[in-house]
Image: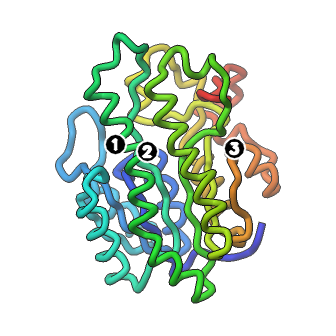
Amino acid sequence: MTGTSLKGKTIFISGASRGIGLAIVKRCAAEGANVAIAAKTAEPNPKLPGTIFSAAEEIEAVGGKALPLQVDIRDASQVVEAARQTAEKFGGIDIVINNASAINLTPTEATPIKRFDLMFGVNVRGTFLVTQACLPYLKQSAQAGRNPHVLTLSPPLNMEPKWFAPHVAYTMAKYGMSMCVLGHAEEFRPLGIAVNALWPRTVIQTAALAMIPGVKPEHCRSVDIMADAAHAILVQPSSVTGNFFIDETVLRGAGVTDFDKYAIVPGSRELMPDLFL
């Protein structure tokens, strides 16, 4: 792992009002990173905690600078404008984190086509659009020697039928994000822009996970493992590209040996592997 700090770097993240995305940018902000939060939630939701404004307060509380932007990442003009405002406020964009994702773990007959469209609109189109809108600024970051990265929260492309059969629409939508990583890593390699994916080895306890029946605290790790792993990737030189990283593997490579600290129930032997692994 390189010793690069993220102090002064500017991060554009989609969908970080709560959960893993917020944990990642707070970890980066603790080193003095600037963070633009491009997410939809501006008003508190009784079912899910957090808004772009509460996230901005948490980022600034740990030492970063924040720009909350209400953005529907399915709307191209909103995304392009958010990227422009970010670059204008902070002097550029060095890191893009494609975190926004919609989930619906349903078989074909039980998947309303509106949910199908939402997952493809947010996961696939949104990832492509956010990356595209930020690309001019990432190129400037590369030219200035600022080590630009794109990090997408999506799984390795394990093309096994067992990952498709129970929820083919969701799997295609998540794998669409991973295909963006595969293609953009190679496309942007000559530009000096890293593109990698990150996925958790175990299920992570978040507010969204509470909507999935049968997952208990003893099955989960905390969002901190993803935050630490993302940080470890983002300080690597941008020549490290095209990888489908798993959080635990990244941290073992960075010298971490104690993983019990990430368990929601320390000492649990019931950690549940995440989907697609």
Q: Where in the figure is residue 58, as x and y percent of width and height?
A: 37, 60
Hey, which quadrant is residue 118 in on the image? top left
**Mark 1 sits on what residue?**
121
Q: Quadrant of the C terminus?
A: top right
10 Å neighbourhood of mark 3: few (<14), some, or many (≥20)?
Answer: many
Instruction: Give the residue displayed 55% in from the left and 73% down from the top.
Output: 31
* Residue type, label 2: Val
SS for callout 3: strand
Foreground mark, 3 or 2, reads 2
Q: Name the front one of labels 3 and 1.
A: 1
- Residue position for label 2: 124
Amino acid carrying label 3: it is Ile
Left or right of residue 47: residue 27: right
Q: What is the C-alpha distance between the residues marked 1 and 2?
A: 6 Å
Proximity of marks 1 and 2: CB atoms separated by less than 8 Å: yes
Nearer-N-terminus badge (3/1): 1
Residue extending farthest bottom: 144
- The residue nearer to you, when weighing 138 against 7, is 138
Query: Residue 258 placed where, x, y %?
Result: 77, 44
Label whose residue precedes the other's in the sequence (3 or 2): 2
Q: Quadrant of the N terminus?
A: bottom right
Which residue shows up at 81% across the image and 46% down it?
A: 257
Residue 235 versus residue 14 in the image, above or below? below
Spatial CA distance of label 3 from label 1 is 25 Å
Task: Return the residue at label 3.
Answer: 246
Residue under the point 71% across and 28% down:
267
**Label 3 to label 2, Cα distance in Å?**
20 Å
Return the residue found at the far left. Answer: 43
Foreground pick, 173 / 90: 173
Q: Amino acid at mark 1?
A: Gly
> Is 78 placed left or right of 130 in the picture?
left
Question: What residue is rendered at 51% in x and 14% in y?
Answer: 166
